[in-house]
Amino acid sequence: MNLDKIYTDLTIPNESKIALVVYDGVGDIATESTGFRTPLEVAKTPNLDALAKHAAMGRLTPVAPGITPGSGPGHLGLFGYDPLEFEVGRGVIEALGLGIELKAGDIAARANFCTLNAKGLVTDRRAGRIDTKVCEAQVEILKKKIKKIGDVEVIIKAGKGHRFVVVFRGKGLEGPLTNSDPGREGQPIGVAKPIKKTAKTTKTAKIVAEFYKQALPLLKNCRPANGFLLRGIAHQPHIPSFQDRYGLKAACIAIYPMYKGLAQLVGMTKIEGAHSLAEEFELAVKALKTYDFVFIHIKPTDAAGEDGNFAAKVAAIEEADAGLATLIAAQPDVLVVTGDHSTPVPVKGHSWHPQPVLIASEISGWDGMERFTERAANHGSLGIFDAKYLIRFMQANAKRFDKFGA
């Protein structure tokens, strides 16, 4: 049985408007260290609370039980693409988000500036989250000195904060490679190796090793960002477009390049110009006049969770809630609020815990919960389901499916 074909055959067009708001990493866990409450439970969220009273709620399994997703798989699931079927390197996503037009055979890598001690061990994987201007200055150092490695062109572009992207362009390259990011402090930079050894992946690994050999000496006197880590070293795969798959003309509003890249990967239009959460919601309201589906990405909740900063995550949720009022006032036919995964404060990183989800529409059904929290979501009518089905609930709530069978 081809379930996607059944959904496609049932799809009917109409003029409904759908808004998906993703509080990155919003899900959390209650532990003794956090007073047995999560940031969502502590935060003052009058707008989310108002939605919760007139919505259906549940929780999403981002990939599969027990599997912790990266941001790419987490968002692809929300967009209806099975993360286990559609694997996309983080570097590809970041490159697209920064406006780099990837060519066939290009290898893209997501890079983080990091801090190395005298022994070459990573003491801070994000270099204290350096300012974007510092990142741009150090990227310029690399760009001026490293333009080609053998017959391979090297393209380097700064992103936000400590992030940048590296693209290797030449003949005979292929990914994916393993990350050079060790994943935790106290370890040396790893060696990027072919996941499947071929002549092309072996050549790519040699190019990446040579890039490190040339780049690290250029950064040795930079503080605190005297090193860098590479993740998602891969080429761009083919993915069917969002509009072809769901019959929805879609737009994305995000501040960070990676999330713009994810949206672009599936054919969403990037709406540029947002520099704050308030501006994101304002642009979303405007975009709903033109587009059927608008995805709004909220980053600070995830950053606070990764830093293990409970108060900062509460503040990020409250700031987002204030901006949400603008979107609620626009009255989209379907309004969904969720996360791409959980980033619990006690974990200080992504986790497998199902994230809460809220769906508000004329026909969503009202669970009558007082608040949008993990505990409330546990009692919601949606139950726990795979994130890849969320888009189907959105289409159904938007009355975009015909009846199945006689």
Image: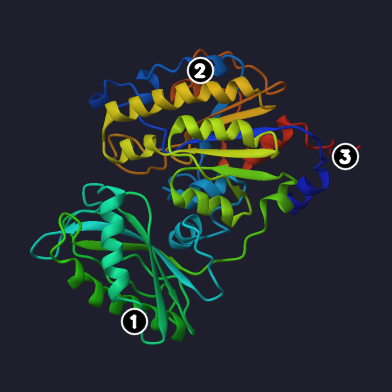
Foreground disc of the pair 3, 2: 2
Q: Residue 120's x, y, as percent?
A: 13, 65
Residue ID for mark 3: 405
What kind of element bears circle 1? helix
Query: Looking at the image, can residue 379 be seen?
Result: no
> Horizontally, is 72 left or right of 185 in the view?
right
Q: Residue 280's x, y, as percent?
A: 51, 35
- The kind of residue on which mark 2 rests is Asn
Q: Residue at x 36, y 50 (%)?
A: 160
Foreground disc of the pair 2, 1: 2
Quadrant where the image shows the C terminus:
top right
Q: Residue 6's x, y, as percent?
A: 78, 48
Q: Residue at x 23, y 26 (%)?
A: 33
> Horizontally, is 322 left or right of 133 in the view?
right
Mark-to-mark CA distance, 2 and 1: 52 Å
- The kind of residue on which mark 3 rests is Gly
> Horizontally, is 40 left or right of 246 in the view?
left
* Residue 192 found in image quarter: bottom left
Residue ID for mark 2: 47
Q: Residue at x 51, y 60 (%)?
A: 88
**Which residue extends farthest right?**
406
The disc, 3 or 1, on the residue closer to the chain's N-terminal end is 1
Mark-to-mark CA distance, 3 and 1: 56 Å
What kind of element bears circle 2? helix
- The kind of residue on which mark 1 rests is Lys
The numbered dot on residue 206 is 1
The disc, 2 or 1, on the residue closer to the chain's N-terminal end is 2
What kind of element bears circle 3? loop
Crowding around mark 1 (Cα neighbors within 10 Å: few <14, some 14 to 19, many 20+) is some
Crowding around mark 2 (Cα neighbors within 10 Å: few <14, some 14 to 19, many 20+) is some
